[in-house]
Image (spheres, coloured by chain):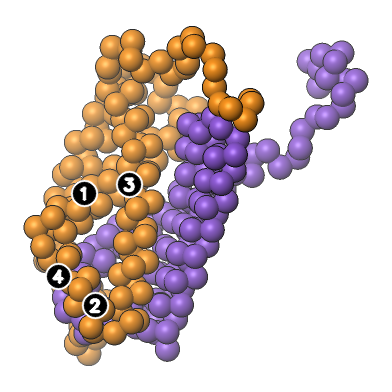
Chain colours: A orange, B purple
Amino acid sequence: MSQTGWTDKRPMSPFVSVWRWHVTMLVSILHRATGCALYAGAIVVAGWLFAIVSGPDYYAGFEMLAASIPGQIILFLFVLSFLFHALNGIRHLVWDVGKGFDPKFASFTAWGVIGLSVVLAILVWWAADLFPGLPGLVDGAYP
Amino acid sequence: MSESIRTPLGKVRGLGSAKAGARHFIGQRVSAIALIVLVPWFLISLLGAVRGDYGDAQYFVSQPLNAVLILLTVGTALYHMRIGMQVVIEDYIGRTALRMVLLILNSFLSIVLFAAAAYAVVTIAI
């Protein structure tokens, strides 16, 4: 490919604009989109760890952002993206051993990944409050 | 047996496989398997720690088991996402110069994030 970029005017694969949308296509695109979103999420997680080591003054800023409504929405979307990407990743691993390619079954697992990731995200969001005493999670959780 | 599927031109060029072509493919899947194990713990712990105050977060990271698991999760995730983002860049960026710049930045950012996270975890834990 030349330095000046792509000059061929003909449409390129995957040619998204002419396809009728179907769920396997949506999930495939979402897998890549959530992967990119989690890239940004990793920057935030590293920032969180760095805020802790930088001291309470820096952490207060992070805490304020995380506790705000937009911060909470972003945090929930981060959890949802994480679970979606993980569940669809398992779907990909099953394909890698050569199973699950039947179109109807692939559509079924695609819907399953969407539904299960939403359910698990709500469950994790809720469980994190339910078990504040996970080993070492909160001061005094250890005897 | 394998000779029969090679074209005459392929035989003359003799380039064959570069011998490491499957490295990223396998690495991406092995790190994915590790992350499946780590992710449930990480998400619940992270949410719990973020919901507490500064002392809670510091205490959480300082526990030996948590510190090791955070390092494993962050390290594996950064390896996984570096390869993943490389594929995305190679797929969508046609211009060679821009592609090279983004690939290098992707490598740098992944390594910088690991250095920052590892420094933070080790410093808090010690």
Residue most extreme to the left:
A69
* Quadrant assignment, res B14: top right
Q: Which residue is mark 1?
A: A77
Q: Earlier in the sequence, mark 1 or mark 3?
A: 3
Residue position for label 3:
A37
Checking the image for residue A59, the label placed there is 2
Q: Are marks 4 and 3 on the same chain?
A: yes
- The kind of secondary structure element at disc 1 is helix
Q: Position of residue A72 (x, y in %)?
A: 14, 58
Q: Give the crowd class for mark 3: few <14, some 14-19, many >=20 residues within 10 Å.
A: some
Residue A126 point in image, percent of width and height: 12, 58
The answer to whether residue B13 is left or right of residue A40 is: right
Q: Is residue A116 left or right of residue B70?
A: left
Query: Mark 1–mark 3 contact, CB under 8 Å?
Result: yes
In contact (CB < 8 Å): disc 4 and disc 1: no
Q: Residue at x 17, y 65 (%)?
A: A65
Identify the secondary structure beneath mark 3.
helix
Query: For the residue marked with disc 4, what is the amino acid?
Result: Met
Give the position of the N terminus of chain A as an image quadrant: top right
**First in sequence: mark 3 or mark 2?**
3
Q: Amino acid at mark 1?
A: Leu
- Quarter the C terminus of chain A occupies: bottom left
**Secondary structure beneath disc 2?**
helix
The answer to whether tags 4 and 1 share a subunit is yes
